Amino acid sequence: DAKTTQPNSMESNEEEPVHLPCNHSTISGTDYIHWYRQLPSQGPEYVIHGLTSNVNNRMASLAIAEDRKSSTLILHRATLRDAAVYYCILRTSGSRLTFGEGTQLTVNP
Amino acid sequence: DTGVSQNPRHKITKRGQNVTFRCDPISEHNRLYWYRQTLGQGPEFLTYFQNEAQLEKSRLLSDRFSAERPKGSFSTLEIQRTEQGDSAMYLCASSPGTRGTDTQYFGPGTRLTVL
């Protein structure tokens, strides 16, 4: 799987939007961009994924750059429950998820 | 649908002992995965099954590790002759289909401490 680069940590205030960046300059044409998050003392959970177009679901939005070399996970109104480690992962046909170190998001009340 | 369950949640053992963990995936999920996570790191892939067939094993899975999924439902991960370096969170995940990009649903993990 191609490599992704994320900031080690980010902070946000409650009820404000959060933009979590991910760089993946070596992405191939068949790589999907997946985001998972891991709350404290829990297993990772799926957030969203996309290929080329921006995607929205009930949890978040995913904005993908036109050249696909970067993407941004957007939490529209952060809550305390969104404090977690967020992982940006590229996947093609392989089944494994290759996690990096992710971004630790802190949400301040 | 009760999600992926793992037992036990915590295991403390002495070096050299054998341990076995169990994972019950979401009902009718074809794929089952094992990952290991050490403190401050993201999870690392160990192995996965499609139904009862073990299709891929990581180089991390030494000869002391063995995983089974005998009837294509629950799975067990056994570690023989445990070492202190085996201390980690062992995570299980399942996915519904056979496409490689299916969403994986994770259990809460089994935390192993080797003394």
Image (cartoon, coloured by chain):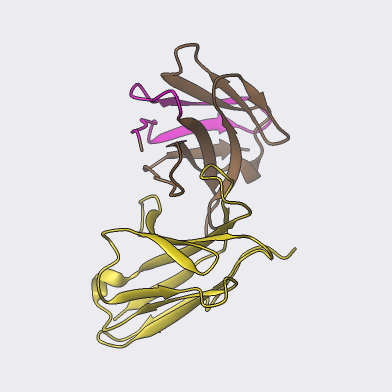
Magenta stretch bounds: A2-30
Q: From the viewer's perspective, is residue A95 above or below residue B10?
A: above
Establish if B83 lies above or below A85: below
Quarter of the rendering occupied by the C terminus of chain A: top right
- Asked if the stretch drawn in magenta spans residue A22, the answer is yes
Question: In the orientation shown, which residue stands out farthest toward the front?
Answer: B53
Q: From where the camera sits, is residue A17 visible? A: yes
Quarter of the N terminus of chain A within the rendering: top left
Main SS, magenta region, reads loop
User: Residue at 40% across / 45% down in the picture?
Assistant: A99
Which of these two is toward me, A66 or A78? A66
Q: Colour of chain B?
A: yellow
Identity of the residue drawn at 33% across and 71% down: B87
Q: Where is residue B82 in the image (x, y as percent from the top left)?
A: 28, 80
Left or right? Give the position of B83 relative to B10: left
Q: Can residue B35 be seen here?
A: no
Q: Does the magenta stretch include residue A7?
A: yes
How many marks the image carries: the answer is: 0
Which chain identifier belongs to the brown chain?
A
x, y percent for residue A41: 52, 60
Give left or right: position of B20 versus B62: right
Asked if residue A42 lies left or right of residue B39, the reply is right
Residue B16: x percent and y percent?
A: 25, 86
- Judging depth in this view, the residue of A107 and B97 nearest the camera is B97
Closer-to-camera residue (B7/A53): A53
Give the camera-side residue of A70 and B112. A70
Residue A31 lies, with reference to residue B51, above or below; the image says above
For image coordinates 72% across by 65% down, the residue present is B2
Along the horizontal axis of the image, is A45 left or right of B83? right
At 36% across and 30% down in the image, what residue appears? A5
Residue A24 image point, x, y percent: 38, 25
